Image (cartoon, rainbow, N blue to C red):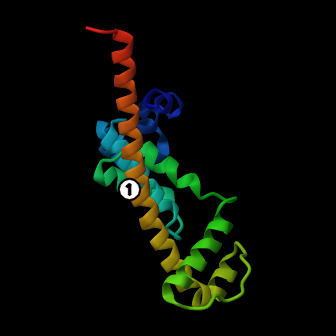
Amino acid sequence: MKRFLQRYLPDPQELRAHKSLRFLGDLLHDPRLWHFGRRPTVLGLAVGMFFAFVPFPWQMLLAAVTATWLRFNLPVAVAMVWITNPLTVPPIAFANYHFGVWLLGRSPEPWTFEPSLDWLLQQADTVGLPLLVGSMATAVVAGILTFCIGHLLWRWHIVARFRRRRIAAGPI
């Protein structure tokens, strides 16, 4: 898994030299941001998953700043945000709205999603609070589940690798 991720991610040196990222200065030189160990990678997955469900713009920027500040794996955190993309946002927003309605104990209002600022401003009073509550609750649950599942899968992978080595080595 580690080699697979490293093969497809951009080179850290290229990112550090990129013109639009120079404002970050020495922050991108921290090797912990690019390390694919269990802790930074799993925490990067969890941070990215959390911000994927946060209903605010600039999710990738928020995930990148958080990963940089807390020293988690930066590319993994930013990549996880793309779970929410133009194709998945409408069904996720719909589900989060209904989850928020359920959490608030309200009845759902009939509405149709339109990706425009005018629609968002007009619907802010009826749709806004349930959508925000549902999205934030989903973000917390998804982040925690991703953290737990990531740790379990990583551990399973390591145990399986050690078993294969022991079997390949034969009896002592």
Does residue 23 appear anywhere in the picture?
no
Say if 59 sits above or below 27 in the image.
Answer: below
- What element does badge 1 sit on? helix
* 171 in relation to 80, above or below: above
**Farthest-out residue, front:** 171
Q: Position of residue 170 (x, y in %)?
A: 34, 9
Nearest the eye: 170 or 40: 170
Q: Position of residue 121 (x, y in %)?
A: 62, 85
Residue 64 percent across, percent down from the top left:
42, 53
Q: Which residue occupies the foreground of this view, 27 or 74?
A: 74
Residue at image coords 57%, 73%: 96
Q: Is residue 7 above or below residue 23?
A: above
Quadrant of the image containing the C terminus: top left
At a point 65% along the width and 73% down the height, the residue shown is: 94
Q: Amino acid at mark 1?
A: Val
**Most extreme residue toward the left, as rendered?**
172
Query: Going by the image, does 122 lie left or right of 150?
Result: right
Q: 21 and 162: which one is in front?
A: 162
- In which image quadrant can residue 36 be found? top left
Q: Residue at x 49, y 56 (%)?
A: 60
The residue tagged 1 is 65
Residue 127: % across, % down:
61, 85
Given residues 72 and 162, the one toward you in this image is: 162
